[in-house]
């Protein structure tokens, strides 16, 4: 239980997938204009990463390893992720049309979001079991969601500020993301060696 709690805190805050590993920057920067759409993207990412971590863990343990074809892990993980994203896209298109329209092109991009594939591969590299891998996936997606919602909130407030012309748009967003990354480094502690 303690190990799972450490994975949860470590993957969501200390090793934040966006702010310390720099994975998943495309949707992080593209969908963070409004808190509502950022929260929707975060929810979709939580669902996809958590479920893909569980399914990839089961496939790796019970199919790839016994058949000694673990070298196919990347291809198999990409197929699992693509199928789950299609499911999420169909669900949102049918039941949450406004969120589906707000996410736009970024929803299918979850398939190619390197954070999703990175979690599945990290679970294999760290020899996580199915439960630990699923917790790692959930925590990583939670960290992504926390980061994108914070950035969206800041961007909404920045819309009312007088930003110098050369910093308007993406430059101030990148500066803000950099400052957030520095702030999240505080979760990793200070080493005086």
Image (cartoon, rainbow, N blue to C red):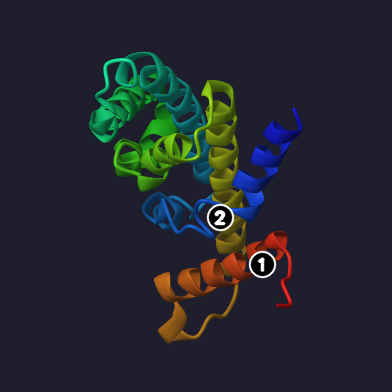
* Above or below, comparing residue 10 to residue 78 in the picture: below
Q: Would you name the residue on which mark 2 appears?
A: 152
Q: Residues within 10 Å of mark 1 (few under 14, many from 20)?
A: few
Of pointers 1 and 2, the one earlier in the residue sequence: 2
Seen at 45% across and 59% down, the residue is 22
In the rendered structure, the answer to whether residue 63 lies left or right of residue 166 reads left
Q: Which residue is mark 1?
A: 183
Instruction: Say which element carries label 2.
Output: helix
Q: Is residue 189 above or below residue 119?
A: below
- Image position, residue 6 (x, y; %): 70, 41
Residue 114 rendering spot, x and y as whole percentages: 35, 46
The image shows residue 182, relative to residue 142, as above or below, that is below
Tell me residue 53's x, y (percent): 46, 28
Q: Position of residue 58 (x, y in %)?
A: 43, 17
Report the number of numbered marks: 2
Which quarter shows the C terminus?
A: bottom right
Please say if the residues under marks 1 and 2 sit with CB atoms less than 8 Å apart.
no
What residue do we see at 44% from left, 29% from top? 48
């Amino acid at each position: 239980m303690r190990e799972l709690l450490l994975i949860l805190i470590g993957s969501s805050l200390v090793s934040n997938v966006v702010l310390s590993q720099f994975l998943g920057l495309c949707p992080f920067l593209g969908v963070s204009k409004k808190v509502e759409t950022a929260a929707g993207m975060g929810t979709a990412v939580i669902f996809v990463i958590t479920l893909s971590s569980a399914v990839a863990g089961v496939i790796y343990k019970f199919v790839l390893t016994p058949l000694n074809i673990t070298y196919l892990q990347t291809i198999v993980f990409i197929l699992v992720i693509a199928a789950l994203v299609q499911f999420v896209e169909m669900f949102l298109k049918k039941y949450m049309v406004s969120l589906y329209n707000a996410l736009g092109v970024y929803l299918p991009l979850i398939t190619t979001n390197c954070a999703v594939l990175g979690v599945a591969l990290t679970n294999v590299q760290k020899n996580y079991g199915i439960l630990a891998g699923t917790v790692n996936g959930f925590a990583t997606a939670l960290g992504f969601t926390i980061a994108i919602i914070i950035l969206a909130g800041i961007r909404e407030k920045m819309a009312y500020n007088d930003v110098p012309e050369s910093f308007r748009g993406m430059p101030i967003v990148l500066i803000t993301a950099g400052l957030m990354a520095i702030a999240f480094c505080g979760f990793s502690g200070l080493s005086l060696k």
